[in-house]
Image: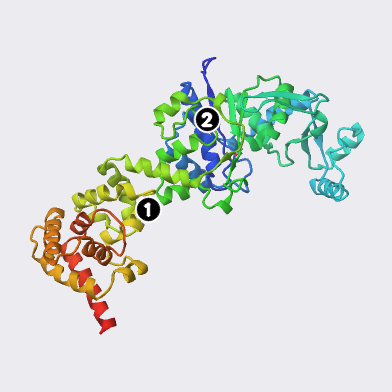
């Protein structure tokens, strides 16, 4: 039994497409609100559109919520399993004279609407079925003509309060008698939503602003059914940096794509939390505990939110940077395997070595898949050489120096950063050249890159044999080309 004062919110996805970032934010705000008030977060799958809903999509949503850590307290409830409940409410509306059967064919109505639009006229259902005589109705019933149910929109303005957008008023004349149950007996979104929000004891409906045009219809349904209304909060749109609604044009918009690129769920949660809400100060990196403590619907900004991909990457990088080496290693495990950097069976065997790599690369990773971009050379031999860097550093002089120094490297028995550094410093001193004249080319020859973590640690982690082999290959290629 719900307590009177208990906050109950819900996430009500339609499983008809991938799990969009916008839906993730809606889920998060509901969850944060529930956790802030120690209320309940309910999951309801709006799958009455059987044609477009799929089990895979439901699973994607459940996986996405789980990944973000948005655990639900009740559900998932499935609307497709509740059809008889909706039918009962529809019958009640018909019995009370708030709804009526409509025998019109949707194709015919569609044609009328299109014709009106072509003539730049507005079009609204003209209630012809409401005006049918008893005889006409009887004939249609006898002929088993398919019938939908329409709500009879009353003749007064609809007013409701939105926590984010304040008072919203809509003229009844602008709302047509909308269908609440289709000819196949399946309710439409507005009817099912109202019935469920009531039956599930939802106290606050927090959803995307795209639904704000549905809310007046839902308010009318609450009133006709004489049910208490929940509070409403419509979340701002999420726009791309070009100020257009966030869509595939802007790159990845499915939560899963972010997961696959190696964004961390806690960074995602932090970032999404700030996409339309702010704690009222400049704080950006916030612990989940703090976000829950501070979260309030009153601080949701009604203005559109701009999705700043770079900020997300920066934030994710900050979360990675703050991790312990062990934590980063654990998070990287699936990526090591997927990117074919380390074989599953080697993960534990190479643990100490991998931990050190985590340590030196930590501040260079914005996303976990960056491990491939910035550190592939640690793991495998098929990494790419930066051509410009190679051109810059590959010449007779650097080749001779490197070749000579490689003999010294070869003699180091304990191949650690310290010993490598000592040898190099001694070598350049004897040569009377600045250390950088060897350090820079050496790095490019061994890693293919101009930048990276400290050279001596890098060489240690690549390991003696592989360092020498790479240097040898570079020299060989150089000599082949230059005779
Ligand atoms: N099924 C709707 C959607 O996915 C839910 C809208 C609502 O929260 O009422 O957009």
Q: Which mark is residue 30?
A: 2
Front residue of 421 and 45: 421
| Vertical position of residue 379 compared to residue 223: above or below | below
Inter-mark Cα distance, 2 to 1: 30 Å
Q: Position of residue 412 (x, y in %)?
A: 9, 62
Displayed quadrant of residue 121: top right
- Disc number placed over residue 369 in the picture, else none: 1
Is 159 situated above or below 383? above
**Horizontal side of residue 58 vs 116, given as left or right:** left
Q: Percent position (x, y) of residue 478?
A: 26, 77
Q: Looking at the image, which residue is at 58% across and 53% down?
A: 249
Asked if ligand 1 lies within 8 A of label 2, the reply is no
* Mark 2 or mark 1: whose residue is earlier in sequence: 2
Q: Residues within 10 Å of mark 1 (few under 14, many from 20)?
A: some
Q: Nearer the viewer, mark 2 or mark 1?
A: 1
Quadrant of ligand 1 in image: top right
């Amino acid at each position: 039994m719900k307590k009177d004062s208990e906050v109950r919110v819900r996430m009500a996805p339609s499983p008809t497409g991938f799990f969009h970032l916008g839906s993730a934010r809606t889920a998060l705000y509901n969850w944060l609100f529930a956790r802030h008030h120690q209320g309940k977060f309910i999951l309801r799958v709006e799958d009455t559109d059987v044609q477009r809903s799929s089990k895979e999509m439901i699973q994607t949503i459940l996986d996405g919520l789980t990944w973000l850590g948005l655990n639900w307290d009740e559900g998932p409830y499935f609307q497709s399993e509740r059809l008889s409940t909706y039918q009962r409410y529809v019958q009640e509306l018909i019995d009370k004279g708030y709804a009526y059967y409509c025998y019109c064919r949707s194709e015919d109505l569609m044609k009328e609407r299109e014709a009106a639009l072509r003539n730049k006229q507005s079009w609204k259902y003209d209630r012809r079925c409401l005006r049918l005589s008893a005889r006409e109705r009887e004939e249609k019933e006898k002929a088993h003509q398919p019938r939908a149910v329409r709500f009879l929109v009353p003749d007064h303005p609809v007013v409701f309060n939105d926590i984010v957008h304040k008072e919203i008023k809509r003229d009844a004349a602008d709302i047509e008698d909308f269908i609440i149950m289709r000819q196949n007996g399946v309710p439409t979104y507005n009817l099912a939503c109202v019935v469920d929000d009531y039956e599930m004891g939802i106290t606050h409906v927090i959803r995307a602003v795209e639904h704000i045009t549905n809310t007046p219809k839902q308010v009318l349904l609450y009133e006709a059914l004489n049910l208490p209304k929940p509070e409403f909060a419509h979340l701002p749109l999420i726009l791309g940096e070009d100020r257009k609604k966030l869509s595939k044009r802007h790159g990845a918009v499915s939560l899963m794509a972010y997961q696959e690129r190696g964004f961390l769920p806690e960074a995602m949660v932090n970032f999404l939390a700030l996409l339309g809400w702010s704690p009222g100060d400049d704080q950006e990196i916030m612990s989940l505990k703090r976000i829950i403590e501070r979260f309030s619907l009153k601080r949701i900004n009604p203005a559109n939110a701009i999705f700043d991909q770079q900020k997300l990457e920066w934030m994710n990088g900050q979360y990675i940077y703050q991790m312990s080496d062990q934590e980063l290693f654990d998070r990287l495990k699936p990526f090591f395997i997927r990117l074919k950097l380390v074989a599953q069976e080697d993960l534990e065997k190479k643990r100490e070595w991998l931990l050190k790599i985590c340590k030196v690369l930590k501040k260079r990773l914005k996303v976990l898949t960056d491990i491939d971009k910035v550190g592939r050379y640690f793991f495998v031999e098929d990494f790419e050489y930066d051509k410009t860097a190679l051109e810059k550093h590959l010449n007779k002089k650097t080749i001779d120096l490197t070749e000579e120094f490689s003999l010294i490297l070869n003699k180091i028995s304990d191949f650690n950063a310290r010993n490598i550094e000592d040898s190099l410093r001694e070598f350049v001193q004897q040569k009377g050249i600045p250390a950088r004249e060897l350090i820079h080319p050496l790095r490019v020859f061994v890693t293919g890159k101009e930048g990276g973590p400290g050279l001596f640690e890098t060489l240690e982690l690549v390991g003696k044999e592989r360092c020498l082999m790479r240097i040898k290959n570079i020299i060989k290629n150089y000599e082949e080309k230059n005779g």
